[in-house]
Structure formats: C-alpha cells, structure tokens
Amino acid sequence: MIRTLSAALLACAALGLVAAPARACGGFFCQSMPMNQAGEKIVFAVESDGTVTVHVQILYSGAADQFAWILPVPAVPTLSTGTDMLFQMIDPATAPSFQLDYATEGTCRMPPSCPSPYPPYDEMGGGWADASPARDAGTGGGVEVYFMDAVGPYDAAVLGSDDAAALRAWLTDNGYDLPAAALPLLDEYVAKHDLFVALKLQQERGVGEIQPIVLNFRERQPCIPIRLTAIATVPDMPITAWVLGAQRAMPYNYMDVRPDLDQPELWLGGLSYASVVTEAVDAAGGRGFVTDYAGAVPLLTLPAPNIAGLRSETNARAFLNTLLSLGFSGDPQLLAILLRHLPPPTSADPRDFYNCVVQTWCGDYDSYLASLAFDPAALVDDLDTTILAPRRDAQAMLDRHSRLTRLFTTMSADEMTEDPVFVMRDMPDVDRVHTARLITECSRAYFEYMAPQRLVLPSGRAVRAREGVAYTGTDADYCGDVMDGTFGPGVDPATARDTALMRSLAPRGGGGCAVVSDRPELAGAFAFLLAAAALLRRRRRR
C-alpha cells in the first residue's frame, strides 16, 4: 500500500513524510549531520531563463516496496536527484535567531568562599569525582506518458490526462495504490490540466537511498500545491520554503504575516517560535507566511572533493581511508554505494565492517580484504553520480543567485485548501537576527543569581523578568544554607525566598537584619507572622 501521496509543486514538487533516523556507530557512521525531520521543506530558484528549479526533500518512513510519490506539475520537467546537504546547510544559515544581550546595573554582593561538602577525589582514588548522572547511552488509454526512466534510485514517470478516471487507472495498474481521500483532490489537478510526476523506488533500492528530487521547468511563479498534503498531515505542520532569485519573494495569495516577537516567554522559555507563528497565521485565517529572512544568499559551501585520483586505488583500506579524510561520513547514500561495491562478509554488520576497515588497529578483516576484488573506477563513478554531482549542482544554483528569501508557516489539514503562490518583488531585506536585552539590577542586598531582572523586548517595551530575592544573612549563614540546599544557585526560588525571609527576621546579634519599627511590640508580632507563613509554606511542599 502506498505510504504517502503528497502535494507537490506548481513550480513544484511533492512534500513527503518522515524518514527513519539513521543509526550511528563509529568511523564513517558516527559523525553524520542529523536531519531535521519536522515538516516539509522545499527550495525554489527563479532562473534568469524563465524556468524554475525546485529541490524537494523527501522524508519517508516505511518499507521500500511501499514507497510511492505523486507530484502535480504544470509542465513537463527535467528530473534529477538532489542532496540533503543543501537543506542541512541552508536551514541553519537562514533560521531566525533570538539573541539575548545581557547587562548588569549596579554591584551585587559577592558569594563567600564556602567549604566544599564533597571530597576532592573519589574514594576509589584516582581522579575527580563525577557528580553528573549516568546516561544511557508504459501508456494506458487516455493517459499520455511524456517520460519514463530511472532517475537516481527512482523509477520515474511524467504523465498527463484530461480523464481523471483514466489517470487513476494508470496509477493503480502501475502500483500506485491511491488512498480514497486523494481521489477528489487528484481530480482537481486533472481539471486544471496539470501533469504528474510519479516516483517509486527501484526494486533493488532501499529506503536509505532516498534523495531529494530536483525538477526544472517553465513556470510563472513558485507555488506549493498543498491540497494533497491534507490527506497525510499533522496539526500545525511546519512548512519552510526558500526562494532564490534576483528579488525578494512574497506570498501572492496568502498574507504576509508578522509574528508577535514581544512575548516574554519566547525569550525566557516556555514558548516556541513555531507556536508564535501558528498564533499569527491562525489570526490571518490560516493562510499566511512569515518572512524569516530576506537578503543576500549566505556564503554556503557544499563539500564536493575531487576523487578522480582514487580510480586506480585497488586497496580497499586505502580507498576508504582516503574517503574518510576527504569528509565522507554518515551518509545513507554512501552506505548503499559501499554495499554495492565493497560488500562486507555476510556475518558482519555493515557499519561495523566499514568503520573497522578505516582503523589502523583493527585487523579483523585483513584476510577478507586481501581476497576482495573491487572496481575502484566504478565506485568512483557511483560516488560522483550519487553524492558529488548533486552537491555541485546545488552549489552552482546557490552561486548564480544574489538574493534568498526564507518563508515559514504552519498549516493543519483544514487549512490546506488553496495552493500558496509566491511572487518576486523589490522589497526591503528582513534580518533573521532578533535581539532583546536582559538587565540584572544589582545592589548589595542581592547575589547576582537572585537579583531582579527586567527584559527589554525588541519593541523597546520593558517587563519584569525576575523578582529579586534579597539575602541579609551573614557569610556563615550563607554557607550553611548552601550546604542545606535551601539557598544558592539552582535552588527552587520559593525555597530560596523562604530562607531569605527567615534570615531577615533573625535578631540583630545573630548576624541578620531585624524588622525595624518604632513600636517593638508590632515588630515582634510582624516577625512572628512572617516566620509562621514561611514555615507553613515549607510544610505544604513536603
């Protein structure tokens, strides 16, 4: 059964589901860059020749023989494969950044040096004690097929029809088992005379070989046909689109939304940026995009080392060590390629085998490697076609454009009723960096970690970020309270406040500050009530 039928693009490609995380273990496979698997991601490039190039990241979870993908497109595209590294590089370089500038006013009280309650060395003798917790580690009737061939790991076809029933029959006959919910949506695209790209994994290919798909065709504007996505989505699904071109990209049929970044919880914790965007988009009726960044294309370099010198390297260990030194690591495509050209012994775990081969101390497979013959030129060709050429193409795309816009939204199924379209406009840049200021208000009554703080938000509005807890006990009192865990860095604020209150009520001779009043009997009664209240709060917490 088909596991995903996603909306694709108008200048467009489909948007897939979530991929299973890659296992990491060591050597080649311990340094892989983690893939952010949340939501849907697509890169558009509005080219100077009137075409649009589209890179779509495909994220999928399921069996290889059940993978199938349908992409509505407005014209016959050229197809090729892309690289996940494009998304891994462009995402953090354009993501919104929320920076707190810290400042201090006045001078706080310095904590005294207290005796340590812990021995400097562990009792087993030999090293500092570790106080950290342990961690676990063809054609058919009424259907025209414009293209049918292998594209990377996929069997791909481009087809069209003015007869929705004939199109559905072709897809079903060719192994695309369409969910019932997709049929009326598919019919809508047929009525618009759109074409469709259909993808399946080739029979011998695995899920780990899934790569982004790249399309290029003539189109008016970049657009994400989102309606098919509604059949297999989650509430408030994140959608990120990057648009390369000569100008800034703007939503045409969606609102240009500005989220409220003056919410203190966004800066102090408890509120995510995605939830702030969701709030703003919902206020716009569920149809809006936020411009996270608009400006010059960041300086991004996708590594594509020259490996032509390895075409004559017949020593498997030397071949793999050179790849490792050139930065090849942790790529599912690399694993699939190595399995084809340098298969491990049947009893060995593939990752353990390849990691062992590149270690000078590991001789477990010396005899096996000596008996293993492989074609280094064929391996180099496979590496270049599958990994390096897509990186070079993506780099060339980045290099030939001057401006980049990052647009972000969240959408639920009931909001996916109109395909978002983007247009290029001469508009001001948008900085991705947002700054607020957290000011600590020091005095001799406060240790810095307990001093009051105010937060100055991006608009200039100031709010109270933390109420201060003054401490009037002596240095000896402080050390005792730290030893008891009732005051000090990391102590629950309510507990610290109770302790500070008790110290403030100590007699004058006891090293604290007494309650001052012109009427001693009232001061005593007031002190008694405050102490009783503090004691009652402590008992309730227990």
Image (cartoon, rainbow, N blue to C red):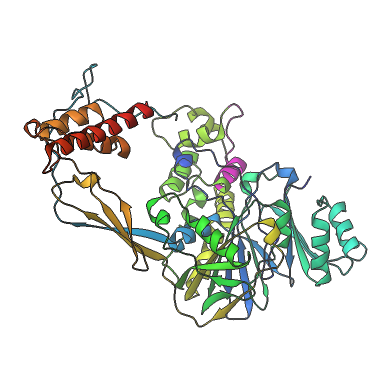
The location of residue 239, given as percent across then percent down, is: 59, 60
Q: In this view, does 465 lie to the left or right of 35?
A: left
- Residue 176 spot, x, y in % from top left: 81, 52
| Residue depicted at x 45% and y 36% | 26
Q: Is residue 160 magenta?
A: no
Q: Which residue is drawn at 12% across and 42% down?
A: 516
The single residue placed furthest to the left in the displayed view is 509
User: Front-most of 384 and 418?
Assistant: 418
Q: In which quarter of the image is residue 243?
A: bottom right
Residue found at x 55% / y 32%: 371
The residue lying toward the viewer, choosing from 339 and 315, is 339
Task: Locate the N terminus and report the quarter of the image it occupies.
Answer: top right
Q: What stretch is highlighted in magenta?
A: 334-347
Is 343 a magenta residue? yes
- Left/right placement of residue 211 relative to residue 455 reads right
**Res 449 seen here:** yes
The quarter of the rendered structure image containing the C terminus is top left
Q: In this view, does 4 lie to the left or right of 167?
A: left
Q: In this view, does 122 lie above or below 530?
A: above
**x and y percentages locating residue 230 in the rendered image:** 71, 56
